[in-house]
Image: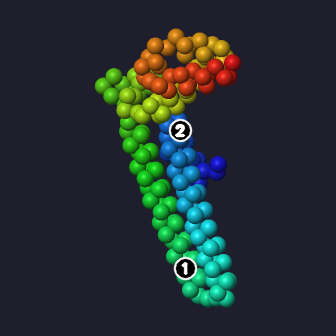
Amino acid sequence: MTIDIIDLNDPQYADLSPVQLSMVRAAQAQKDKLLLAAEAEIRKLLLRMVERNTARASAREKEETRLRTEANAQVDAVREDLLYQLAYEAYQNEGNENGRYRYPENPNYNLSYSQRFLVVRQYYMDVTSDPVARLDAYRMDSLARTYLGDFYQTLYDLLASYC
């Protein structure tokens, strides 16, 4: 997937967390879907006009422009929503009275369970490159059981698959 909804080389976005990267990927997928739908609609329009022998009409050009403008406006809305989500997530990651949010020292309970899954997975992937030691450490992590809820087993299965 090519990510072009925001410039990830921009220093502001260079060090996104796993949760923020998943937000970017979701927004990129939504953008791609909107643009594909607009192009499909333009193709249908062209086929209808060819059937009626009016494909060279200026009405087709105006309609194509309108469809592209609407799609770009929707993409801009997705981009603005993404930027808002990234800013809010950065605010949430700042921390609380116990310091900066960081698993396992000060976990962020404001995250959804799927976002917690990403944070804990990234933590264990960064801890060691040995898959067996990673799985053993995760198995002994009592905080992960309560912090991840139903996602604990999913992450366990994922880490076990690396062994």
Q: Residue furthest left?
A: 97
Which structural element holds mark 2? loop
> 115 or 98, which lies in front?
115
Question: In this rendering, is residue 91 above or below 140?
Answer: below
Q: Is residue 116 left or right of residue 7?
A: left
Query: Residue at 55% across / 71% down in the picture?
Result: 68
Pointer 2: what residue? 15
| Residue 137 screen position, x and y as percent | 56, 13
Pointer 1: what residue? 63
Q: Which mark is residue 23?
A: none
| Residue 4 screen position, x and y as percent | 59, 54
| Residue 88 screen position, x and y as percent | 38, 43
Q: Label 2 amino acid?
A: Asp
**Local crowd size for mark 1, using a 10 Å CA cut-off: few (<14), some (14–19), many (≥20):** some
Q: Earlier in the sequence, mark 2 or mark 1?
A: 2
| Residue 31 screen position, x and y as percent | 54, 57
